Amino acid sequence: MTDALKRLSDEGVAIWLDDLSRKRITSGNLAELIDEQHVVGVTTNPTIFQKAISSGDGYEQQLADLAARKVTVEEAVRMITTADVRDAADILRPVFDATGGQDGRVSIEVDPRLAHNTRATIAEARQLAWLVDRPNTLIKIPATKAGLPAITETIGNGISVNVTLIFSLERYREVMDAYQAGLEKARAKGLDLSQIHSVASFFVSRVDTEIDQRIDALGTAEAKALRGKSAVANARLAYQAYEEVFGTDRWSALESAGANKQRPLWASTGVKDPAYKPTLYVDDLVAPNTVNTMPEATLQATEEHGGITGDTIAGTYEQARADLDAVEALGISYDDVVQVLEDEGVDKFEASWNDLLKSTEAVLERLAPAEG
């Protein structure tokens, strides 16, 4: 074992676990990861919950009670998922207190079927914050066009937000603008800006997956030389945008009023291509004031093999831009890639949510008490 996770944390990268289940909570595993592997936060998404609840571990009694009450499947899923998030938030509360609210956070996502409905997303965010009822919760809102005003309104209501499914640099800048607009609304209402936090989840590995697939279709040596370079380049340029936006006069005015920077969060950091080192999207994205949310396999790989050598983003912007330009020169459209990834991301989470509803409904029907 190395002490790579400690070195990563010391470099200013908050390590969050991209997974949650009731078994992980009740077995003490989550507490162990916090104590022993420098984990200071948890992210969830519809796919994670679908896998956890479908496994059945630890959910039987609650499902039986919900069946007896004859609740709708939507209500059952929300009761189950918010219970897990609430319990995880309680386990992470000491971290939250020790870091002044920056870490010790647990994220829960709005219903992915609302991704293109601004008003419903705002209402869902408010409802989730009320249901979980923990100060160390982040409500996840996807960075769709409809999501942007929902981010502003939710932040303006004093609710902390994890903006998810960000793939493009342009959209990321829009997200940072939406966050600042929300803080300006909150300030106008007299809310305490120091209590509002946000992260912007910039997805990494899926960019390589999509672009590498297009590179492989071209099949030339010139094209293949660019495999595995796009995701890191894209993320590094996102950090450049972060530095620019949070160095403006607009931001300075908010910071003077107590506002917290919206940290970049590297999401989708498990490699999809076995040809790449399993810690690629950890080792190559080290920079201060960032978050890396990892599946457990990536967390373990980093602990055992992580090559943490200090800041690996500073001084890379020119090369990162050159790498993306070289891909564009092959005829692979960056704008098309990021739009495809956003559309697919929403569709995948919606499919997982629908699978979760179906599997939960089947269990509720099986456990429903006999009439009479």
Image (spheres, rainbow, N blue to C red):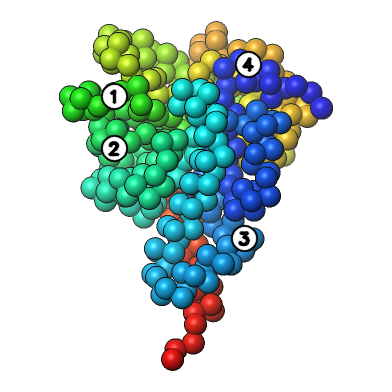
* Mark 3 or 2, closer to the camera: 3
Badge 2 element: helix
Q: Which mark is residue 154?
A: 2
Q: Is residue 209 above or below residue 65?
A: above
- Name the N-terminal-most of marks 1 and 2: 2
Which residue shows up at 45% across the image and 45% down it?
Answer: 108
Instruction: Give the CA distance from mark 3 to mark 2.
Output: 32 Å
Instruction: Give the CA distance from mark 3 to mark 1.
Output: 38 Å
- Name the N-terminal-most of marks 1 and 4: 4
Q: Residues within 10 Å of mark 4 (few under 14, many from 20)?
A: few
Instruction: Give the CA distance from mark 4 to mark 3.
Output: 35 Å
Which residue shows up at 30% across the image and 45% down it?
Answer: 126
Badge 3 element: loop
Q: Percent x, y for residue 345? A: 46, 46
Instruction: Give the CA distance from mark 1 to mark 2.
Output: 14 Å
Badge 4 element: helix
Residue named by callout 4: 10
Which residue shows up at 40% across the image and 29% down it?
Answer: 198
Residue named by callout 1: 192
- Name the amino acid, label 2: Thr
Residue toward you, 366 or 319: 366
